[in-house]
Amino acid sequence: MIIRPERDKVRIWSPAKLNLFLEILARRQDGFHELEMLMTTIAIYDRLEFTPDGSGRIRLSCFWKPGYRVLGHDVSPEGRGTTLGDLPTGADNLVWQAIDLIRQNSGEKGSHLGARVSLVKGIPSGSGLGGASGNAAAALLAANECWQLGLPPKRLHELALRLGSDVPFFLTGGMAVCRGRGEIVQPVHDLPRLHFVVVRPPEGLSTPAVYRDCSPAENPASVYPLLSSLRRGDCRDLNHLVVNRLYAPASRLLPWIGRMSREFTDLNCPAHQMSGSGSSYYGLFYNARQARHVASRLRSRRIGTIWSVSSTPPGDNCR
Ligand code: C5P
């Protein structure tokens, strides 16, 4: 998260994430799943601008980044009319919900607090890239800062989990092992910077639909062998270590997933996997030049929107 406070507002660039590991340990009584994940933020961003006022209202406008292209579908200069997913601007948007939630938890002065918020989306939805979760974390941080609420990190974390399982991770970002529903966040500081080619095919996937069709692992894989390999910069067996237990249900729902796996195998990528519940797919590299080379080869195959990006460090956001 990159935070720029200005005179009358705050601007936040909220990053996307990738799951380098996602194992399903159990189905819980509350309908969620017990997970073990390794997540990293990457340099694909949405931009949120939060201007506080005393109107008592939350006014949200939302646009796709102009110039966006998905398989030849250009985004108009106003950023509308795309195949990248819906852009709700009311109470359906997690940003709106985050601001309303923190306002309800800010005591007496809450009723006068208002804001104009603009969100420019660079992260497609239905992608497993955590765009909406990152936006929600950014909105909590922005409101806490601009409305001078002074909520401590622990309280922000509690509110974040009420908004979504991945939202607590985004409060700090960087690389972390996440457990429970995703809210037990253990930062990992000793991994090298990693480089990725990320492909978002022309169709997205619904997270609840993918989880509905998944099964907890009978012999769960562990994240530790992957952490050791990444620390050593080792490519051997890397492709077997970047597990995603949601790959099978996602690929049953969307043939693009299997197609992308074959494309990366064909290009001799050392490790590749789907992110989260899909539909985005990534290749992992220790070297940025190699990632750029694979990205340029994939671009000619017209399989979706393609980025060549790196992991990003954690922010110092919870002040
Ligand atoms: O928490 P969040 O709203 O992001 O979850 C979206 C959906 O993903 C849930 O409704 C549930 O179907 C699934 N999920 C799950 N177990 C988790 C996280 C998410 O089953 N730990």
Image (cartoon, rainbow, N blue to C red):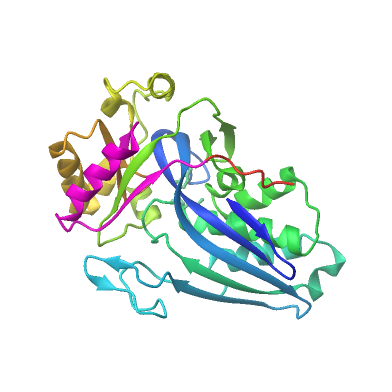
Can residue 232 be seen from the camera position used here? yes
Residue 117, by quadrant, is: bottom right
Residue 66 x/y as whole percent: 40, 73
Residue at 56% x, 50% y is 167
**Which residue is farthest front?**
289
Can residue 88 be seen from the camera position used here? no
Residue at 45% x, 41% y is 311
Residue 5 x/y as whole percent: 70, 60
Task: Out of 36 and 290, give the one closest to the viewer.
Answer: 290
Residue at 74% x, 47% y is 155
Task: Specify whether residue 289 is painted magenta.
Answer: yes
Range shown magenta? 283-312
Residue 107 x/y as whole percent: 84, 62
Residue at 52% x, 25% y is 190
Left or right, residue 25 beside residue 313? left
Vertical relation: 289 (above or below) 108 = above
Vertical relation: 54 (above or below) 84 = below
Left or right, residue 136 beside residue 213? right
Residue 217, by quadrant, is: top left
Q: How many marks?
A: 0
Residue 220 x/y as whole percent: 37, 25
Task: Specify whether residue 129 is painted magenta.
Answer: no
Left or right, residue 222 beside residue 50? left
Task: Out of 14 and 136, give the one closest to the viewer.
Answer: 14
